[in-house]
Amino acid sequence: DINLGLTAELLLYDFGNARLQVDAQKELVLATRQNLISVEQSVLLRAIDAFMSVRRDARLERISRNNVALLREELRSTEDKFAQGTVTNTDVAQADARLAGARSDLAFAQSALTRSVAEFVAAVGRKPGQLQPPRRLPQLNPDVEASKSIALRGHPELRREQHNVRVAEINIEEAETAQKPRINAFASASVGH
């Protein structure tokens, strides 16, 4: 005895429930895109910050190194003057203290540069090498209120949350339509031996 059956179901009307499900998924995709843009901006900001920190700390390290060299020379000169009897032991001690302070500043500047280089490597994926100064900075809108308006309209995290709010609103509508009846068409056929 063999039985073979076929059943088909077609949704005719569901008060927009299926459309709302699709709309919610579209809004979710748009929210996810805005999240990706936000992540991209964070990565770029981290790289720019690392770039500028390396440039700043390299300059401070160079200035500190030059200061140590200058104060070392000043100490030698003061020691020579002390040997000639034109300055006192206090003058030599003061010059020595200034050199010690400059060496401390240099050590701090070197550690800051090392930290900035490590952050650059983490952000960019390679050592900084010779960094060129940034080209001309972009022109900023002098109107603060207009700038705030642009930021509020275009910030990816705000836009993401707007899409998430829309998803929640659509889900509420979908839940309301899910409680309404659905109109389906059924067809079935069977053959038996």
Image: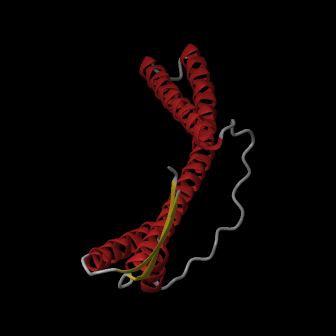
Between 99 and 15, the one lying in front of the other is 15
141 over 74 or under it: above or below: below
Indicate the position of residue 1 as horizontal and vertical percent values.
50, 49
Total numbered labels placed on residues in the image: 0
Indicate the position of residue 36 as horizontal and vertical percent values.
53, 59
In the displayed structure image, the side of residue 56 where residue 1 appears, left or right: left
Quadrant of the image occupied by residue 124: top right
Between 108 and 45, the one lying in front of the other is 45
Quadrant of the image occupied by residue 27: bottom left
1 over 135 or under it: above or below: above
Indicate the position of residue 44 as horizontal and vertical percent values.
59, 55
Between 87 and 131, the one lying in front of the other is 131
Q: How is the image coloured?
A: secondary structure
Quadrant of the image occupied by residue 118: top right
Indicate the position of residue 181 as horizontal and vertical percent values.
28, 81
78 over 11 or under it: above or below: above
In the displayed structure image, the side of residue 64 where residue 184 appears, left or right: left
Q: Which residue extends farthest top? A: 83
111 over 184 or under it: above or below: above
Residue occupying the point 37% across, 76% down: 166
Residue occupying the point 35% across, 77% down: 170
